Amino acid sequence: MTGKERRTLMDEAIKDIVIPFLRTEGFKGSYPHFTRIKEDKVNLLTFQFSLYSSKFVVEVANCPVGGSTVGGNKIEPSKCRVHYEGRRFRIGSIKHKMDYWFDFNNDLLFF
Protein backbone atom coordinates (compact mmCIF):
# COMPACT_ATOMS: atom_id res chain seq x y z
CA MET A 1 0.00 0.00 0.00
CA THR A 2 1.38 3.41 -0.92
CA GLY A 3 1.73 6.31 1.50
CA LYS A 4 -0.96 8.20 -0.38
CA GLU A 5 -3.36 5.26 -0.04
CA ARG A 6 -2.60 5.04 3.70
CA ARG A 7 -3.25 8.75 4.10
CA THR A 8 -6.57 8.48 2.25
CA LEU A 9 -7.66 5.63 4.53
CA MET A 10 -6.56 7.51 7.64
CA ASP A 11 -8.45 10.64 6.53
CA GLU A 12 -11.56 8.52 6.01
CA ALA A 13 -11.20 6.89 9.43
CA ILE A 14 -10.78 10.26 11.15
CA LYS A 15 -13.81 11.66 9.33
CA ASP A 16 -15.96 8.58 10.05
CA ILE A 17 -14.93 7.96 13.67
CA VAL A 18 -13.15 10.88 15.31
CA ILE A 19 -15.02 13.87 13.91
CA PRO A 20 -18.48 12.58 14.93
CA PHE A 21 -17.08 12.11 18.45
CA LEU A 22 -15.66 15.66 18.45
CA ARG A 23 -19.08 16.97 17.40
CA THR A 24 -20.73 15.22 20.37
CA GLU A 25 -18.18 16.96 22.59
CA GLY A 26 -19.19 20.38 21.24
CA PHE A 27 -16.40 21.01 18.72
CA LYS A 28 -17.15 22.97 15.57
CA GLY A 29 -15.05 23.63 12.51
CA SER A 30 -13.83 21.57 9.62
CA TYR A 31 -11.09 19.02 9.27
CA PRO A 32 -8.29 19.51 10.29
CA HIS A 33 -9.12 22.49 12.59
CA PHE A 34 -11.71 22.43 15.37
CA THR A 35 -12.82 24.84 18.10
CA ARG A 36 -15.04 24.55 21.16
CA ILE A 37 -16.06 27.82 22.77
CA LYS A 38 -16.47 27.63 26.55
CA GLU A 39 -17.33 30.37 29.05
CA ASP A 40 -13.73 31.02 30.06
CA LYS A 41 -11.65 29.83 27.06
CA VAL A 42 -11.74 28.43 23.56
CA ASN A 43 -10.47 24.86 23.14
CA LEU A 44 -8.54 24.33 19.92
CA LEU A 45 -7.69 21.01 18.28
CA THR A 46 -5.95 20.25 15.00
CA PHE A 47 -4.58 17.30 13.09
CA GLN A 48 -1.12 17.79 11.56
CA PHE A 49 0.27 15.23 9.11
CA SER A 50 3.93 14.61 8.36
CA LEU A 51 5.09 15.49 4.86
CA TYR A 52 7.64 12.69 4.96
CA SER A 53 5.96 9.65 6.49
CA SER A 54 2.63 8.08 7.41
CA LYS A 55 2.34 9.85 10.75
CA PHE A 56 0.25 12.57 12.34
CA VAL A 57 -0.11 14.47 15.59
CA VAL A 58 -3.17 15.85 17.28
CA GLU A 59 -2.35 19.22 18.82
CA VAL A 60 -4.47 20.98 21.43
CA ALA A 61 -4.38 24.46 22.91
CA ASN A 62 -6.60 27.11 24.45
CA CYS A 63 -7.09 30.73 23.49
CA PRO A 64 -8.94 33.53 25.30
CA VAL A 65 -12.71 33.80 24.76
CA GLY A 66 -12.09 37.10 22.99
CA GLY A 67 -9.76 35.46 20.47
CA SER A 68 -6.03 35.80 19.86
CA THR A 69 -3.74 38.46 18.50
CA VAL A 70 -1.40 37.26 15.76
CA GLY A 71 1.13 39.63 14.23
CA GLY A 72 -0.81 42.57 15.64
CA ASN A 73 -4.06 41.36 14.07
CA LYS A 74 -7.03 40.35 16.21
CA ILE A 75 -8.35 36.87 15.33
CA GLU A 76 -11.93 36.01 16.33
CA PRO A 77 -12.34 32.87 18.46
CA SER A 78 -13.88 30.72 15.72
CA LYS A 79 -10.88 31.48 13.45
CA CYS A 80 -8.18 30.76 16.05
CA ARG A 81 -5.84 27.87 15.36
CA VAL A 82 -3.61 25.77 17.61
CA HIS A 83 -0.44 27.03 15.93
CA TYR A 84 -1.33 30.65 16.86
CA GLU A 85 -0.92 29.82 20.53
CA GLY A 86 2.46 29.74 22.23
CA ARG A 87 1.47 26.98 24.63
CA ARG A 88 0.19 23.87 22.89
CA PHE A 89 0.35 20.15 23.53
CA ARG A 90 0.51 17.03 21.40
CA ILE A 91 -1.79 14.20 22.45
CA GLY A 92 0.23 11.17 23.51
CA SER A 93 3.44 13.04 24.31
CA ILE A 94 3.08 12.89 28.09
CA LYS A 95 2.20 9.19 28.11
CA HIS A 96 5.06 8.29 25.77
CA LYS A 97 7.48 10.82 27.36
CA MET A 98 8.49 12.18 23.96
CA ASP A 99 7.15 14.20 21.05
CA TYR A 100 4.61 11.58 19.99
CA TRP A 101 3.35 11.03 16.43
CA PHE A 102 0.67 8.44 15.62
CA ASP A 103 2.15 6.11 13.01
CA PHE A 104 -0.27 4.59 10.49
CA ASN A 105 2.40 2.95 8.33
CA ASN A 106 1.48 -0.52 9.57
CA ASP A 107 -0.66 -2.48 7.07
CA LEU A 108 -2.35 -4.26 9.97
CA LEU A 109 -4.20 -1.02 10.76
CA PHE A 110 -6.12 -1.27 7.50
CA PHE A 111 -7.69 -4.70 7.39
Image (tube, helix red, strand yellow):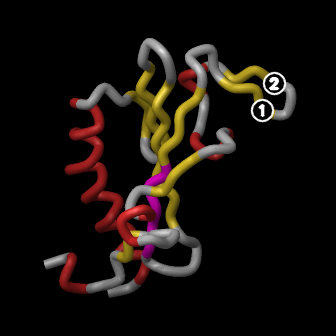
Q: Is residue 56 magenta?
A: yes
Q: Quadrant of the N terminus?
A: bottom left
Q: CA distance from mark 1 to mark 2?
A: 5 Å
Residue 10 higher or lower than 73, as above or below: below
Disc 1 marks a residue whose amino acid type is Val
* Circle 2: element type: strand
Residue at the (86%, 27%) spot, across then down:
72
Q: Quadrant of residue 13?
A: bottom left
Q: Residue at x 44, y 71 (%)?
A: 97
Report x, y in % for residue 49.
50, 64
Report the number of numbered marks.
2
User: Which mark, by number, is residue 73?
Assistant: 2
The magenta-colored residue range is 55-59
Q: Is residue 93 above or below residue 110?
A: above
Residue closer to the observer: 30 or 41:
41
Residue 11 location (% of width, % of height): 35, 59
Neighbour tally class for label 2: few under 14, some 14-19, many 20 plus, Cα within 10 Å:
few
* Residue 6 belongs to magenta span: no
Q: Secondary structure at mark 1?
A: strand
Residue at the image position 52 percent from the left and 69 percent from the top: 99
Q: Nearer the viewer, residue 90 or 4?
A: 90
Q: Which amino acid does the dot numbered 2 rest on?
A: Asn
Q: Quadrant of residue 10?
A: bottom left
Place of residue 27 in the rendered image (x, y in percent of width and height, measured from the top left): 36, 30
Whether the residues at callouts 1 and 2 have beta carbons within 8 Å, the answer is yes
- Residue under label 1: 70
